[in-house]
Image (cartoon, rainbow, N blue to C red):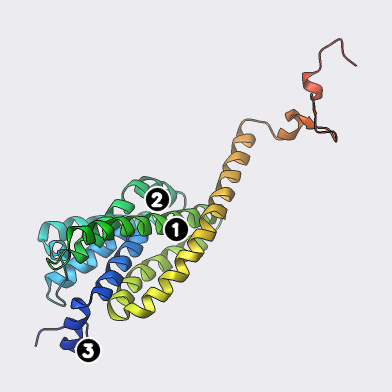
Amino acid sequence: MEPTIFANPEIANAVIASPFSQFALAAGLAWASGMRLYAVCFVLGALGYFQVLTLPGNLQVLSNPWALGISGALCAAEFIADKVPGFDSLWDAVHTFIRGPGGAMLAALAVSNGANSELTQVMAAMIGGSLATGAHLTKAGTRALVNHSPEPFSNWTLSAIGDVASLGIVWLAWQHPVIFCVVLAAFIVFMVWAIPKLWRLIRGTFRRLHRFFSGNLNPKSTDPVISASGGSKASLSDAGPGRN
């Protein structure tokens, strides 16, 4: 009997054949790709290459030796880059344009098994791209805030949590799709709430840094003063030499 991550091969076949489970797997791959795209590709490809499991849809392409080698090299690079405070935010900035399309691609591959229509694949790609982009923005915003801490341990801890969580998400989506969908719904609610707040905090931080390096330590002194009647008064710096 070939090794499998499932306790029962019949359960494995049922999971792969179920449309609901295909949706859960596609969503799980997209969500995890928003945090660790290369790790997801490499681990799935390795499991398929060594016949630990049969990858559904067209995900078998990840088991190609060339794809496996490239994803493995990028996975190692990302593992190191994500542990370096400051550089991890630069890495995240570059991957704003990579993780979203990568999640869309994996989601589409997961449902492209011949039984699903092209419309299903397109919908999976759109949903997967949105999930991956949202997960990426949440992750990148959180790490950018943590990078303000002078000590590196919080950064390393969050990075390690991301490593484990990304693979745990895929496992949960594959093994327990119903539980996964509940967790995913909770994450989407949190993501919608958190992303605007995270990026407002980051924007405020960059503004303070800009003021600090430009020497404008008291920016409110040059701002117009709003009177109680609703009109604006010019600041003292705008007053001419002949005014009192």
Disc 2 secondary structure class: helix
Residue 203 in sight from this viewpoint: yes
- The residue at the far left in this view is 1
Q: Which residue is nearer to you in this view: 77 or 119?
A: 119
Q: Assess disc 3: are there few (<14), some (14-19) or many (≥20) residues with their C-alpha within 10 Å of its C-alpha.
A: few
User: How many discs appear?
Assistant: 3
Disc 1, SS:
helix
- Do the numbered discs 2 and 1 sit on residues whose CB atoms are within 8 Å? yes
Q: Quadrant of residue 175?
A: bottom left
Q: Which amino acid, mark 1?
A: Lys
Q: Position of residue 230 (x, y in %)?
A: 80, 33
Quadrant position of the C terminus in the picture: top right
The quarter holding residue 241 reads top right
The type of residue carrying mark 2 is Asp
Residue at image coords 74%, 34%: 220
Judge whether residue 218 can be spotted in this image. Answer: no
What whole-number distance in Å separates the C-alpha atoms at marks 3 and 1? Answer: 33 Å
Which residue is pictured at 31% across the width and 49% down the height? 98
Q: Tag 3: residue type?
A: Ala
Q: Are marks 3 and 2 in contact (CB under 8 Å)?
A: no
**Residue farthest along the right direction in this orientation:** 244
Q: Residues within 10 Å of mark 2 (few under 14, many from 20)?
A: many
Q: Residue 212: give its label.
A: none
Residue 29 rendering spot, x and y as whole percentages: 29, 65
Eye-nearest disc, 3 or 2: 3
Q: Which residue is mark 1?
A: 139
Image side of residue 96 versus residue 114, left or right: right
Taking the image as shown, residue 239 lies to the left or right of residue 158, namely right
Query: Where is mark 3, residue-wise?
Result: 7
Question: Is 186 placed left or right of 46 in the picture?
Answer: right
